Amino acid sequence: MEFLIRAGEILQPNSPLHKTKKDILVSNGKITQIADSIDFEGKVISAEHLKVSVGWVDMRAHYNDPGQEHKEDIETGAKTALAGGFTDVVLLPNTHPIVSTKNSVSYYQRFNKDSQVDLHAIAAVTVGCEGKEITEMIDLHTAGAIAFSDGIKPIWHTDILIKGLQYLQKFDGLLINKPEDRLLTSFGHMNEGEVSTMLGLKGMPTLSETLMVERDLSLLAYAGGKIHFSLISSAESVRLIREAKANGLKVTCDVGVNYLKFTDDDLNDYDTNLKVNPPYRTAADRDALIEGVKDGTIDAIVSDHLPHDEECKKLEFDLADFGSSNQQTYFSVLNEVFGNELDNLVDHFTDRPREVLGLDKPKIEVGQDACLTLFSPDQPWEFNSKTNQSKSVASPLFNSKLKGKVIGVVNKGALFLNSYED
């Protein structure tokens, strides 16, 4: 297959091509020419204000496969990822059964052989993600697990966390933890504050997160190794991690894309698609998260794609499940939050997640394999039943008109173009 990307603005920080507008010729999966103008009579891809970066990485998604394929499966998940602009997706281990054996890791590797999207398995730190007994992490690493986490569950057991950090140092493995003290969030449904009081809903205090961040940082200083905090949601967490990095600890973190847009004020209509864990917090917290992205304290922006069927969401707010479908609307939210500043922040979903995970970093250079995402910040589109690629419609942006469209993805010798109309 041969095609030309016409007049795309290349976004690749630390490259001499960054913010230059070029034609890019791709032949048989490789970039064969980059120039100001290329004469070509074959397939040409163009769009108004077209931008090109290396393929995007989503460090946190859940496809519920195996075990709950009625919510999402790896086929529909991969389609959703492509439509959202992702070439690589890191999947949580909270499936049925839990990802804690070689066979469970190889399940995704077999899928990757014929998929344009590479799925990377996180293996469980503890058996059954119950926090009591550590898994065979060396064997799982050898089998291809990209990192270790209990996923949607925090590692609550301090001795397990220390042993996990020590164990993983044998092969420079990464421990990912969701900072949450579940004894403080029990029966909670949203951020604890003025809004939860007015709405009559039990709150989930910021303290439940920051206590765990402080604990884990202390254990990291004691045991060594490296840790990644997934889904931080508060200003205090940003401050603590910023200080820990300045003190030389090997700590990284990510934030969910929707936490950069929504606050607890948005829950006044009891929209269950805004019920997530951790909860959306205050405007001050949101502003601190945005600043944390800009100053580099936050390493990655994830989708936190946690799809649900309607039976789990069309309920009273206190009965609905946590989570929403976010992968396909990812870029539109970023585009709304950052605007033109996003050009200098693409490394938060391209290079920096790969650095955290130890993945090879693609380059937009002649002779390199083409791993590209094509997108336009100015093109509108509507997220609805016709454009949605996921099995889930549990999105706070469903049936919304959005600005910022993924044009397509180039990866593994194949070209995917979003076919829906503006």
Image: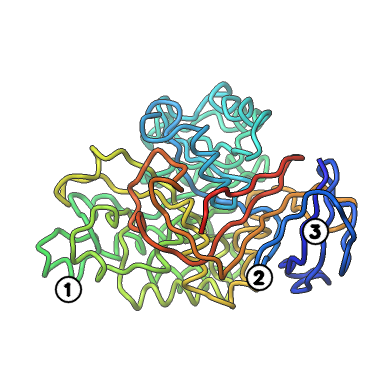
Residue shown at the point (17%, 50%) measured from the top left? 187
| Amino acid bearing label 2 | His
Quadrant where the N terminus sits is top right
User: Which callout, 3 or 1, points to the residue nearer the camera?
Assistant: 3
Name the residue rendered at 39%, 55% in the picture.
Answer: 179
Residue type marked 3: Ile
> Picture coordinates of residue 406 (x, y %)?
58, 57
Residue at (66%, 70%) from the top-left corner?
A: 49
User: Which label belongs to residue 194?
Assistant: 1
Residue 310 in which image quadrant: top left
Between residues 195 and 75, which one lies in front from this camera angle? 75
**Crowd class of label 1 (few under 14; some 14 to 19; many from 20; radius 10 Å):** few
Is residue 115 at least partly visible in the picture? yes
Residue type at mark 1? Answer: Glu
Mark sitting earlier along the chain (2/3): 2
Q: CA distance from mark 1 to mark 2?
A: 42 Å
